[in-house]
Image (cartoon, coloured by chain):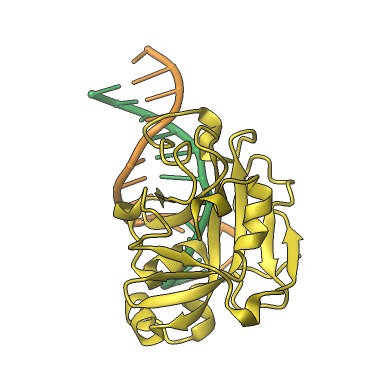
Chain colours: A yellow, B green, C orange
Amino acid sequence: MKPSFYARPVLEVAPDLVGCVVSHAGTSGVIVETEAYHDSEPASHAFVGLTPRTATLFGPPGRAYVYRSYGIHALLNAVCEPEGMGAGVLIRALEPVAGIELMRERRGLQRLESLCSGPGKLTQALDVELEHNGCDLAVGPVVFSARPRAWRDVEIVVDKRIGITKAAELPWRFCAAGSRFLSRPVR
DNA sequence: CATGGGATTGACT
DNA sequence: GTCAATCCCATGC
C-alpha cells in the first residue's frame, strides 16, 4: 500500500492491516493479528521521544520498523501517522500463504499453525532482520500489499495487547475472527 | 562507560 | 506452570 494508507491514526491502520499480505524472500502470509503503539502511551518505544532507536518510528509512514527483542528475535512494525508522530503497528501473526516449505526450513518445524503464530516467529519464517529497518513497504524488499478478495470483509475482534507491563489495559490488539494462526487466543 | 530492561520463544518441571 | 537465552540501546554516573 501507498504511504497515504499508513498516514492515518494508528488505531485505524492497525485493524485495516489485518487481511493484508506480507511478502519477503520467497515467502508470504496474510496478517491475522496486529497491535497498535503510539508515542502518547508508555508501552510504545516512541514514548521516550526521538532517539536513535526510535528515529524510524518518527519518520515517514509506510516504512518498516524492525528492532531486536530480548536479544534474540526481530520484531516487525509498520510506521504510521504523519512524519514527526511516533506510531507503529506491530505485526504479531500471519496465516502462511506462499513458500511454506521454506518457512518450515527456516523455523525448523513442520506444523503449519506454528510457522508464523507470533511476532518473533513470523520474522524468522520470512527471514526479516534488523537490516530491513527503514525499508519502504511499498517498494521492498519487505512488501505489504492490499487484502486479497477473500479477505476483503474479514471480521476483526479486539483484545488487550500481549506481553507488556505498561498501559496493558488498552484494547489495542486486532485479530481476524476465528483464525487458527493467532499468537494466542482472543480472551 | 556500566547497568538494566524488555512489544519473545522454546525447553523443561 | 517456570525460566534462561542474548542484543540493542536508554539512562545515569
Pinpoint residue A53: horizontal percent, then vertical percent.
39, 37
Q: Work out whether residue A149 or residue A156 is closer to the camera in this orientation and state it.
A: A149
Which residue shows up at 62% across the image and 50% down it?
A36
Image quarter (top left, top right, bottom left or bottom right) of the C terminus of chain A: bottom right
Identify whether A139 is placed above or below A184: above
Q: Is residue A27 left or right of residue A97?
A: left
Residue A123: x and y in percent read 41, 65
Residue beneath the point at 64% across and 33% down: A40
User: For the image shown, how many numbered marks are present on the structure?
Assistant: 0
Residue A162 appears in the rendering: no
Residue at 58% over, 35% down: A39
Residue A18 in sight from this viewpoint = yes
Q: Front-most of A62 and A29?
A: A62
Q: Position of residue A11 (x, y in %)?
A: 68, 49
Across and down, in percent, residue A94 comes to 53, 72
State which quadrant residue A125 falls in.
bottom left
**A139, A111: nearer the viewer:** A139
Name the residue: 50% across, 28% down.
Answer: A49
Does A121 appear above or below A37? below
Whether residue A165 is situated above or below residue A149 in the rendered picture: above
